[in-house]
Image (tube, rainbow, N blue to C red):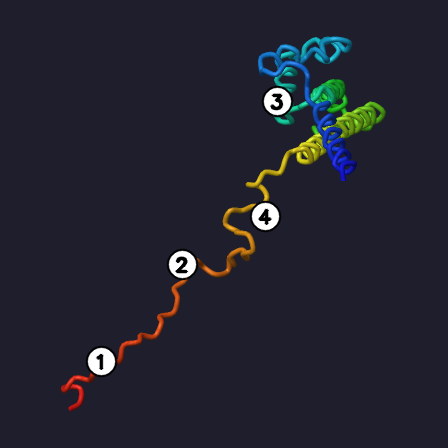
Amino acid sequence: MGQRGITVATDKQTAANRLNAQKSTGPKTPEGRAAVRLNGVTHGLTAETIVLKGESEADFTNLLNSLEAEHDPASPTEEALVVQLAMATWRLRRLYHQEAGFYTCQLQSLVGMQKDLNLDDAGRMGHAAAWSESTLNMFNRQEGRLERTFYRALHELQRLRKERESNLASVLPVTPESDPRHSPSVSAGAEPPNPSVSAEAELPAMPSDQPPPAPKAADMQ
């Protein structure tokens, strides 16, 4: 009997240790977290690698802040995954701008051909795509790679959150309020009330022990 109690206590402690290991040991206040949020991005990778010349570092910071507010990371691993989401999203935006700029340059170079072949805008777009198949394929490959990076990080974030919630539920104590067996409305040895029977239902009138009243003379005529 004693051995069984020791095993249960050890299991609970193990679950609690796992839960504590997932908790962030960094700053707790919003100001403190904001001060160190970009440390992992600016060191090693450096901000110049993420935000190129001509791009807005403030826009990238706002993107990262919005993703962090949405996913509310609770550990360094989850924080890193949120950064991956921000980086993949930022690079996808850059890729779309690059593709648009590429088409602009190609269409500009076809202005003379438009006059010779009497091409409209759709025809110029067709020629630009036909002459640049390898470049457009490169754009498509990069887009697919960045999308896969984004969704892998997103799915891992969701998995970690479910695991954290499951671990939290396993270590939380069961209180009498949360256990229906200890409900004060159910006394020992008594069956719980039937919810199908309304408490305000009227009971049928009991027959009276008094004799019925004698008929009046007017009623006998």
Of badges 3 and 4, the one in the foreground is 4
Residue 65 lies in quadrant: top right
Residue carrying label 2? 200
Residue carrying label 1? 213
The label shown at residue 181 is: 4
Could you tell me the amino acid type at mark 4? Arg
Q: Is residue 184 above or below residue 12?
A: below
Q: What is the x, y in percent for residue 126?
A: 77, 30
- Identified at 77% across, 35% down, the residue is 7
Q: What is the x, y in percent for residue 140?
A: 80, 28
Q: Which sits earlier in the primary sequence, circle 1 or circle 3?
A: 3
The reply to whether discs 1 and 2 touch (Cβ–Cβ < 8 Å) is no
Q: Which sits earlier in the primary sequence, circle 1 or circle 2?
A: 2
Does dot 2 land on a helix, a strand or a loop? loop
Residue carrying label 3? 66
Could you tell me the amino acid type at mark 1? Pro
How many neighbours does mark 3 have within 10 angstroms: few (below 14), some (14-19), or many (20 or more)?
some
State how far apart marks 2 and 4 are (Cα).
25 Å
Could you tell me the amino acid type at mark 2? Glu
Task: Name the side, left or right, on which 211 lies relative to 38.
Answer: left
